[in-house]
Image (spheres, helix red, strand yellow):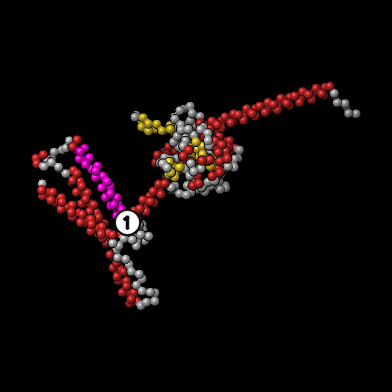
Amino acid sequence: MAASAALLLRLRSGLRLGARGLCARLATPPPRASDQAAEIGSRAGTKAQAQGPQQQRGTEGPSYAKKVALWLAGLLGAGGTVSVVYIFGPRRPGPQASHSSLSPLQETTLWMKLVPRAPEISFLGVMGLCLCHPKPSIFLSASQIPDEFDNDPILVQQLRRTYKYFKDYRQMIIEPTSPCLLPDPLREPYYQPPYTLVLELTGVLLHPEWSLATGWRFKKRPGIETLFQQLAPLYEIVIFTSETGMTAFPLIDSVDPHGFISYRLFRDATRYMDGHHVKDISCLNRDPARVVVVDCKKEAFRLQPYNGVALRPWDGNSDDRVLLDLSAFLKTIALNSVEDVRTVLEHYALEDDPLEAFKQRQSRLEQEEQQRLAELSKSSKQNLFFGSLTSRLWPRSKQP
């Protein structure tokens, strides 16, 4: 037992000394290539003498990087081995330290020893990723691409490259995949609908259901076929969902077997803001004055609030008629040739149920129109009555 403890102490001290030496070497910059060996008009002999040390330094760079990577891999491997032996090795001396299997309680106790070491192991893993992050190179070629970090020490180079990598990855998650998510509008002789309709999939067209017997299933909302058939000549239909493409692609195929949907956009095309996947209309490559977004979350079109219609999430009720009301609402906008849909949608932006408010206004206008027609017909009947009466009382004289 004393020998094993002495060996462990010696190994620990060796690792500390090795880590200090490695950090000291990493903190010093590699030998840089000297400035140009000679000016353009110098002698050829001077150039030949200057090219020799430069080539030697160029060959020393990759070998030095390989040595650093090997030292680092060895250090991390040795540290991981010592950690595993320390955590999961036999802790009971004497005859109790047998090779018999441990009970579940003992295994749980051993695993709990790993919890206090989690920050140390995470730090070692992050440092290993930072230091082993390769320099970008040309595809299918051994030549490396020079970047803005070449003049820094090796440790600083790796840290800054890793920071730039994570920053670019974070930017890729937050920003849409392209500033122009849709291709240019069609030109003659092809037909381009005058308006663009952006629809969410989950909560608007489909309702997810889960049960122990069947797992996840998606229920189609009543009126989907009518919506597509009536609006396809007037609107360019785009499915823009916050679901991933792997999940949404087969669902769209089942919802639209006749191909009324023009384009499909998924979660990678959204802009991630404050925990919400926001649909940026400015990236659609379409005129924002003629784009209508239909979603069940107002946060989905928070960047352009007057381009959206927020519906209540569908709960799976089979008697639902919201899509039919939505079709009538959007047809009214298109048939009236509204130049800017935002002027219309702004009136419904503060409504809890925009379609219900539209139906109430529509019924009110119909009542007013019927009342106006009734008054007009009544006045016309009175005019006819008085006209016939005067013609009877004062008949017109016959012309000679």
Q: How many marks?
A: 1
On the image, the x and y values in percent for residue 84 come to: 20, 46
Residue plotted at (15% across, 38% down): 101
User: Residue 384's x, y, as percent?
Assistant: 76, 25
Membership of 285 in magenta stretch: no
Looking at the picture, tell me which residue is in the foreground, 242 or 16.
16
Q: Is residue 397 left or right of residue 371?
A: right
Q: Amino acid at mark 1?
A: Gln
Up the image or down, 167 lies above or below 237; here it is below
User: In the displayed image of the protein, which residue is found farthest to the left?
Assistant: 95
State whether residue 307 is above or below residue 363.
below
Residue 348 is drawn in which quadrant? top right
Q: Which residue is mark 1?
A: 158
- Residue 228 image point, x, y percent: 51, 36
Q: Is residue 120 magenta?
A: yes
Residue 52 in sight = yes
Q: Quadrant of the C terminus?
A: top right
Question: Which residue shows up at 70% across the image and 27% down it?
Answer: 376
Q: Which residues are magenta?
A: 107-132
